[in-house]
Image (cartoon, grey):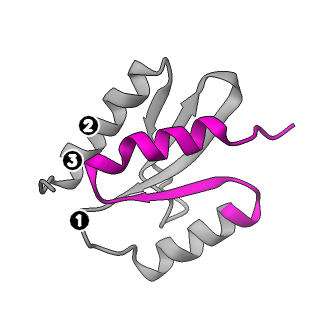
């Protein structure tokens, strides 16, 4: 397993999403700290939030709280700390249902 920086993992995620005809938008919410790094939008209305970390690093307590809040609203939230996990995350997002 190779070690990648958070930036490198984000770049690989963005490339994979783009290859799937989607968008991996950098998500910044100045008035609501602790939100995940990326909003991944895939064809057919599939979407998820992705928190990117370096290998083995855990989300801060506020981030965990935000992830729980988003999940309670019915959104998928993933913590990605290894580039080799990107295909699995993409598959789970693609299989996730869209909100109607």
Q: Which mark is residue 3?
A: none
* Residue at the (47%, 46%) spot, across then down: 89
Name the residue carrying label 2: 11
- Report the residue marked by disc 1: 55
- Lateral position of residue 72 relative to residue 31, left or right: right
Quick one: label 1, few (<14), some, or many (20+) residues within 10 Å? some
Location of the N terminus by quadrant is bottom left
- In percent of width and height, residue 84 lies at 28, 47
Look at mark 3 in the image and give the residue it sits on: 7
Coordinates of residue 35 in the picture (x, y in percent): 51, 60
Instruction: Relative to 94, say whether 21 is above or below.
Output: above
Q: Of callouts 1 and 2, which one flags the residue occurring earlier in the amino acid sequence? A: 2
- In the rendered structure, which disc, 3 or 1, sits on the residue that comes first in sequence? 3
Q: Are the residues tagged 3 and 2 within 8 Å (C-beta)?
A: yes
Q: Position of residue 50 (x, y in %)?
A: 47, 51
The residue drawn where x is 48% and y is 27% is 23
How far apart, in angstroms, are the residues tagged by discs 3 and 1? 12 Å
Q: Nearer the viewer, residue 15 or 70?
A: 15
């Amino acid at each position: 397993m190779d070690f990648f920086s958070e930036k490198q993992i984000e770049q690989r995620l963005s490339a994979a999403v783009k290859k799937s005809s989607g968008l991996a938008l950098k998500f910044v919410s100045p008035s609501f700290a602790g939100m995940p790094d990326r909003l991944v939008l895939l064809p057919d209305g599939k979407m998820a939030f992705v928190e990117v970390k370096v290998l083995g690093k855990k989300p801060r307590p506020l981030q965990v709280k935000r992830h729980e809040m988003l999940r309670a609203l019915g959104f998928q939230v993933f913590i990605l700390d290894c580039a080799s996990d990107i295909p699995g995350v993409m598959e789970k997002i693609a299989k996730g249902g869209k909100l109607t």
